[in-house]
Image (cartoon, helix red, strand yellow):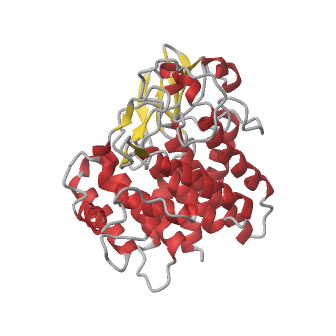
Amino acid sequence: MISQTPEENAVKYRYFRQRLNSEMMLFTGDASVKGSHLPMERRYLYRGERMGHWGDAVWWQGHYLAVLATEYALKQRDGENTAATLRELRLALDVYRRLDLSAERCFGDTTPQELNGFYIRDDVGREMAPSLKVRYVNSDYTYYCGHTDARRNAPSQDQAWASYLGFALIQKLVDDTLLHREVAELAGRMVRGMQYTDGNGRAHWQIMNPVTGAVVQKEGDIQWLQYAHGEIGTRLAGRNLHAGRSDKPQWRNTWNLLQQNVLIDRDGHFTWYGVLSLAAVLNDGAGRQDCYQWMVETCDKVVRRRPDMQQSLIFPHLPLINLVLHGTEGRELLPKERYEAYLNAAPASGCITSEVGGEEVRTAAPWHSLSLFCPWHTSVTGDANMLDYMLLYNLYRLVYEN
């Protein structure tokens, strides 16, 4: 049975990829279609009817890009046809443009818009339910579009964290200059969208709604990571995207201090993820020479601090992303068995909770939460999109099969 596991894991991957396109997003082949090419977070039963749920959709979109970029690299390495994956990548990137161009309408401005880095997280409407074979659609768009004071469907820095992962992997692994140019433009607009210049010409790391003039995410939330945002944007876009004093020693030192104290807040879930994902892309582990080793040690520290999450390595995909982006040579890698244990344990039918005979049945750890990307979400129900398995599987193959 052990000898069959690699093939079994490959079968899981193919099943989850097919299910993602056919059941968990509106795959039209045309990214201009409203709501299309955005993976749902999960689907679940609500009063006996199937519900499709989208939340923080751009955050998931970044991970979806990462899956596609790593899939492309594996197909190219193995001599397989890459055309379908490349086409899907273009569609997924075009979604960012659509969400940018349509954002202002959600807040009452119906005039033609230009790309400006202010986007909505999704545009999935209730009318899409029949096409997705669900009874209801639950999304940030359905709840908040049309409410001029709403912030829940507007940009936030955590949407950028995951997008950087996808953008960086595309630039590293996909040999298409047009896609590289598109990624550079998207990254530039995304970072500029987190910057605001006041009437005195002073730059702030603050997200403002250009229609209402309201603060979407205040400066105090972003400024601690402004060095990392500015540096990643500069690298991805190929031009200086620092603002204010974000490239000065004060904010670089603040970034390193935050890395060294990532566990200062026991429940700082998204802070952990943000710091580690930014570090993976920057290859900057609190100033240490080997960022990968720092990431592994930090992930292990989180596991020891939070045994209730029942993980053997928190965010197992992030150290592998660092290796794929910045190389493995001269590094002492984790034993591949630690990753194989994750892949082998993943249920073939997916996660997270289902109802059998009127009783709730939850997947066993470590696949008992919404996603390995957010393992603290252990109370949600339904079928997860399994982007976490797909990305981990591809990264494992890229690192340990080479």
Q: Residue furthest front?
A: 200
Between 41 and 124, the residue placed more toward the observer is: 124
At horizontal 67% and vertical 61% (from top left) the residue drawn is 180
Q: Is residue 114 above or below residue 17?
A: above
- Rendered position, 200 above or below 169: above
Q: Position of residue 211 (x, y in %)?
A: 50, 27
Q: Is residue 24 visible?
A: no
Point 52% across, 51% down: residue: 163
- Tell me residue 352's x, y (percent): 46, 38
Residue at the outermost bottom position: 330
Q: Is residue 209 above or below residue 283?
A: above
Q: Is residue 191 visible?
A: yes
Q: How many marks?
A: 0
Image quadrant assignment for residue 361: top left
| Residue occupying image coordinates x 52% and y 31% | 54
Q: Is residue 83 above or below residue 129?
A: below
Q: Which quadrant holds residue 49?
A: top right
Q: Which image quadrant: the C terminus? A: bottom right
**Left or right of 261 on screen, residue 81:** right
Q: Is residue 54 left or right of residue 93?
A: left
Residue at horizontal 54 percent and vertical 20 percent from the top: 108
- Image quadrant holding the N terminus, namely bottom right
Image coordinates for residue 100, horizontal then vertical, percent = 59, 37
Place of residue 199 in the rendered image (x, y in percent of width and height, measured from the top left): 38, 40
The residue nearer to you, when weighing 257 against 194, is 194
